[in-house]
Image (spheres, rainbow, N blue to C red):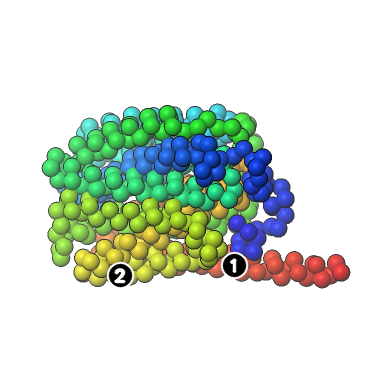
Amino acid sequence: MSPASTGASTSVDAVSPVRSSDSASDSRMAPGGPGYRRMSFALFLAGVATFALLYSTQALLPLISGEFGVAASEASWTVAAATGGLALFVLPMSALSERFGRRTVMTASLAVAVSVGLLVPFAPSIGALVVLRAVQGAALAGLPAAATAYLAEEVRPKALVTAIGLFVAGNSVGGMSGRVITGWVAQEWGWRVAVGVIGAIAVACAVAFRLLLPAPKHFRPGSLRPRVLLGTVRDHLSDPLLRRLYAIGALFMTVFGGVYTVIGYRLTEAPFSLPQGIVGSIFLVYLVGTVSASTAGRLVGRLGRRGALYLAGGTTAAGLLLSLADSLPLVLLGLVLITAGFFAGHAVASSAVSKTATRGRAQASALYQSAYYVGSSAGSTVGAMAFHSGGWAGTVGVGLLAVLAVLGVVTITVLGSRAAQVAARRQLVAAH
């Protein structure tokens, strides 16, 4: 992320090993090079498993509400507990990855999460289900921050946005396939069998991930001392650019979490009254997110990061407004735009965090992921509450407020960048 586009200090490039220019002597992975395809596919599968598990109950909330006799706002905790557990544990897990290695922590994280996933279908009550989902989210916390740190260390800088985009694309495929599969399976055999199937798929993804991911070559173990960790976190939180990127991730996810937690209720009610299988198939629009995330690098190349974020926010807002219609085609088009805008914005912001942090990259990524999933939990809960009190228009209103906040944060960053440029020019003139 260049100083001109972010407001970052112009001295950063001089000290960051990740930002050095690509050369023949650079042993990090690059497209077409040894190990790159295996690495990309392994992390893609990890992304599939993460989102499939994390949101496995989201498309099933109407069925869960029916079985346990609870309202949408209560059933939504099966989603919010998982994302909240991830948000709470992502920083400690990132610290473990600094000490024991990215691949080790990611492997352990997936192993525990898929094990819990096989227990979820047997939850005897809504309370037990929420607890299991919280544990599952906490287990998954080791994956996202360690994955982006792994990429920042093992992939050449020019390929970083594309590599992270592919990981995010795996998220979108996992989110889509999980919801589509659970929708159709649940229609025939109930929500318990549906989440069991997702658990089995996640087991296969976890095994393939461990077999395919290349061993890291550039990882250097860090310290687990609390003072060192707290110092690194304090440094990251004192960086204005990183704080803005964290806010952008949280706000985008607030929109996305709210929309996709509530959409099942809207589509199963009048005027649509769709069956559960068709509602699950609605999540095929996640394929749009796969494309927008994987092409985020090219988008940044054309528009710059701030331009890409403006476009992502504007696309999301347009989708929210379209979704207010009582026409199913327009609602679907709205979901397409929301999904495309969200995944593009997320890929751009998360890759910017990895490039901005000059040390403690796992902690920098962990703070982003924590903010991101706090946004998901907030969106799921507040979006469901807004739907309960104001219908779909209430959920859309919450989303629009979050998008406006995103655009405001990007604008503040642009203004800060311009102010920094003006100050630099004045200093240059004064020096002469």
* Residue 5, quarter of picture: bottom right
Q: For the C terminus, give its image quadrant.
A: bottom right
**Looking at this view, is 331 or 223 the one in front?**
331
Q: Position of residue 333 (x, y in %)?
A: 29, 65
Is the residue marked by circle 1 packed among few (<14), some (14-19), or many (20+) residues within 10 Å?
Answer: some
Taking the image as shown, residue 378 lies to the left or right of residue 157, namely left
Amino acid residing under circle 1:
Val
Residue under numbered circle 2? 322
Question: Could you tell me which residue is drawn at 52 percent across and 30 percent down?
Answer: 215
Compared to residue 284, the image places residue 37 above or below, namely: above
Residue under numbered circle 1? 414
Taking the image as shown, residue 128 lies to the left or right of residue 317, namely left
Which label is found at residue 297?
none
Compared to residue 385, the image places residue 45 above or below, namely: above
Compared to residue 404, the image places residue 369 above or below, namely: above
* Residue 332, quarter of picture: bottom left
Q: Position of residue 395 (x, y in %)?
A: 31, 62
Question: Could you tell me which residue is drawn at 35 percent across and 64 percent down?
Answer: 337
Between the C-alphas of marks 2 and 1, the distance is 29 Å
On the question of residue 214 being in view, the answer is yes
Q: Position of residue 292 (x, y in %)?
A: 41, 57
On the question of residue 254 being in view, the answer is no
Amino acid residing under circle 2:
Leu
Q: Farthest residue to the right: give it.
A: 432
Mark closer to the chain start, 2 or 1: 2
Question: Could you tell me which residue is drawn at 53 percent across and 65 percent down?
Answer: 303
**Looking at this view, is 402 or 350 the one in front?**
350
Question: Could you tell me which residue is drawn at 50 percent across and 56 percent down?
Answer: 297
Is the residue marked by circle 2 packed among few (<14), some (14-19), or many (20+) residues within 10 Å?
Answer: many
